[in-house]
Image (cartoon, rainbow, N blue to C red):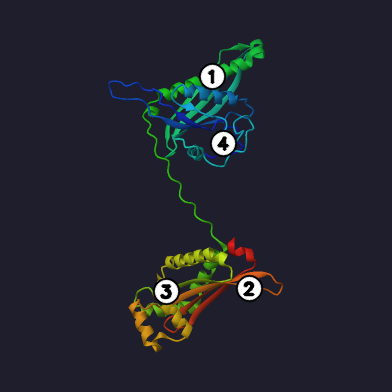
Amino acid sequence: MIISKKIIALVAMCAALAQAQTLIPTDTQGRGEMETRRIALVVQNHASLGAEVPMMALTDALTAKLSGRGFQVINPYNVVGVNQNRNVAGEKTPEISTLELARGVGAEGVLTASVLDFLDTTLGTPPVLHQYVVRISISLADAGTGAAICGETIKRKSPKYTNNQVAQNSQEYLGDLVHATAEECAERLEANPAVLAWKPAPIPVPPMPRPPSTSLDSRVDVLIREMLANPQFARNYEEGKARQEGRLPVVVLGGIENKSGNAALNDLIEAAGEHFRVKLFNSKLFEVKDDGVLVALAKRIVASGNSPLEDGELMGNLKQHGSPEFFVVGDLKRLTDLDGIGYYKLRLAIHSLATGKIVWEGIETFNRESEVAK
């Protein structure tokens, strides 16, 4: 269930420390005291539009009654925000679930009390008697698993009052009904076997947030797609695969070199290189290697522009390291256009180590200098 500002509810959202109250006296069956529990209380108004539900009074009454039965609610008004629950308007509620709210304040469970009906029924035409009716649904859920522990629906009616009595004492009658309803809610929870047997599950550790993709990552993705779709590269790839006798061609990664002159970009460029490696690995087209010896050998071949077949030493070293077929290298340069506006160019190139020649090259341009670290 998602809480939004449209819900009048979240009048009470708080961490509750259940002190070691004696809820179950030790008996002949060996049952002992209920362990300390921490709960979050959420009170919601789901009554029909226009029903004037005394939410503050209900919140206070539930807090008091639960505290008397082992759920001692502390600081019920300022756990979330400053004036979250001090008045009907409150503050804008966070767009998260009640479970997330409970976990955020270290609660083991969340108790939700929803007002379903709050009516002033009348008898006679014209009315001569009034009777207040309230129906509340309560549910307790484990904060660790989200599973419901128990649920109860309580309906209570006030005595019948005359028009004159209502005119003079309606607030008192409503208060009495609210407190009686809160009392019954607490009694139901206290007596519910599922509550007494409840063993809270550990709160799950939230996963580490995935860092947002940078502009460099997205540009690397574009270049990889272009490379894999390029017909010339496809022909060279198939030739390399044939030389591997059915095995995946080995590609050596030379990384992305920072030629921008901006050392502050080193970490971003290194991360983009890692992103590049993962993308090639996930393509399942290559066996990916980036060890230093192979990179050094590949750079010697590329620098010479010749096939390693022309250099016996190079050829022998390549064979010792698995006879790689391709070498992929990139760089990021900073340039300035005629208007003096700086921009960046990201280049990736793939070399055939059988020939020492470039078999594919792609360039992505950043129109604005600030995009590189976006």
Q: Position of residue 320 (x, y in %)?
A: 33, 78
Ranked by sequence position, the earlier of labels 2 and 4 is: 4
Ranked by sequence position, the earlier of labels 1 and 2 is: 1
Quote the CA–CA distance across marks 4 and 3: 54 Å
Ranked by sequence position, the earlier of labels 4 and 1 is: 4
Please say if the residues under marks 2 and 4 sit with CB atoms less than 8 Å apart.
Answer: no
Outermost residue, right side: 339
In front of the other: label 3 or label 2? 2
Element on which disc 3 rests: strand
Residue highlighted by disc 3? 251
Q: Amino acid at mark 4?
A: Val
Residue highlighted by disc 1? 179
In front of the other: label 1 or label 3? 3
Seen from the viewer's position, the closer of residues 289 and 188 is 289
Q: Amino acid at mark 2?
A: Leu
Ranked by sequence position, the earlier of labels 1 and 3 is: 1
Element on which disc 4 rests: loop
Q: Amino acid at mark 3?
A: Val
Q: Position of residue 296 (x, y in %)?
A: 43, 77
Q: Amino acid at mark 1?
A: His
Residue highlighted by disc 4? 80
In front of the other: label 4 or label 3? 4
Relative height, residue 114 to residue 348 (above, below): above
In front of the other: label 4 or label 1? 4
Please say if the residues under marks 4 and 3 sit with CB atoms less than 8 Å apart.
Answer: no
Quote the CA–CA distance across marks 2 and 4: 50 Å
Q: Callout 4: few (<14), some (14-19), or many (20+) C-alpha neighbours within 10 Å?
A: many
Q: Which mark is residue 335?
A: 2
Q: Position of residue 40 (x, y in %)?
A: 49, 33
Ranked by sequence position, the earlier of labels 3 and 2 is: 3
Quadrant in which the C terminus appears: bottom right
